[in-house]
Amino acid sequence: MSISRNELNAFLANLLTPEKIKDYCPNGLQVEGAEQIERIVTGVTASQALIDASIEAGADALLVHHGYFWKGENPVVTGMKKRRLQALLQNDINLFAYHLPLDVHPTLGNNAQLAQRFDIKNARGLELGNPFSVAMQGEFEQKKSIDDIISKINSSLGVSALVEKSGPEKIKTVAWCSGGGQGYIEQAAEQNIDLFITGEVSEQTIHTARECGIHFIAAGHHATERYGAKALGEYIAQHLPVDVTFIDIPNPA
């Protein structure tokens, strides 16, 4: 069983609607490979290690959250970029990438998957007036201690999160953004949210947390964006006649 490259491209475009979201890279098909697709590998980043694993798995397509051709990057095809593209082209592997559209999808997206894993209820946008808010907010069903939340996050993601405990003793409201969303902490604080969770941390983030009285947790960019690609692959396997395998390339950052 297989589908055409164009069929997969149309299926993903209809599901993730990238045209509705302004992004930093092209979403959809980034590198053209085989016309017919039987096997898809999903993962977080189209690194050389993931490409090599896809080749070994006999994939016709690689579907990732972090692809190529970012705004502002050097456009020349040399070194690492040349080796990655060469491996994809020589092995006739299609590369599909969805960045922000995969972050914000209401059920399969990275943020939606984190809400499920952390037991966050009533998820909605943090950016007021933006229907495609990258950052989200919600509540816990019952108030929790910061230590209980830290334990839940560490065990769920398999990480040892960086934590700044500067909020209230009991936590009800929470905001979050997968990946490098630390800049949203000020919006969370302005809305009197108890806790902000993201992947990365900047030097100024800790000062903001302390001075605004909000708890902050950075659980890793890769770890917080692992589950969108996995969920998307599982959805594809349920709806299309293709084999899909999620491959996680460990990354502590």
Image (spheres, rainbow, N blue to C red):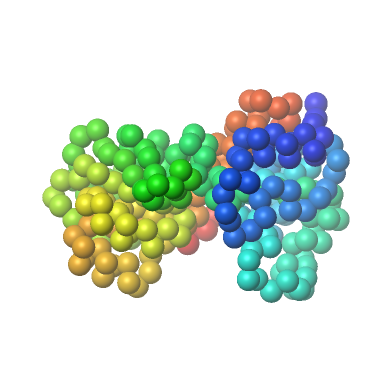
Residue 110: in sight, yes or no?
Answer: no
Question: Residue at the spot x=77%, y=34% of the render?
Answer: 7
Question: With 242 as the anchor, is 217 left or right in this view?
Answer: left
Question: Residue at the spot x=66%, y=25% of the render?
Answer: 239
Q: Quadrant of residue 1?
A: top right
Residue 170: in sight, yes or no?
Answer: yes
The residue positioned farthest toward the left in the image shown: 169
Q: Where is residue 82 shown, x and y percent of the image?
A: 78, 68
Q: Where is residue 74 shown, x and y percent of the image?
A: 69, 74
Question: With 7 as the anchor, is 143 left or right in this view?
Answer: left
238 versus 90 height, above or below: above
- Considering depth in this image, is 192 or 84 the residue closer to the camera? 192
- Considering depth in this image, is 242 or 208 the residue closer to the camera? 208
The residue positioned farthest toward the front in the image shown: 129
Q: Where is residue 16 shown, x and y percent of the image?
A: 60, 40
Tag count in the figure? 0
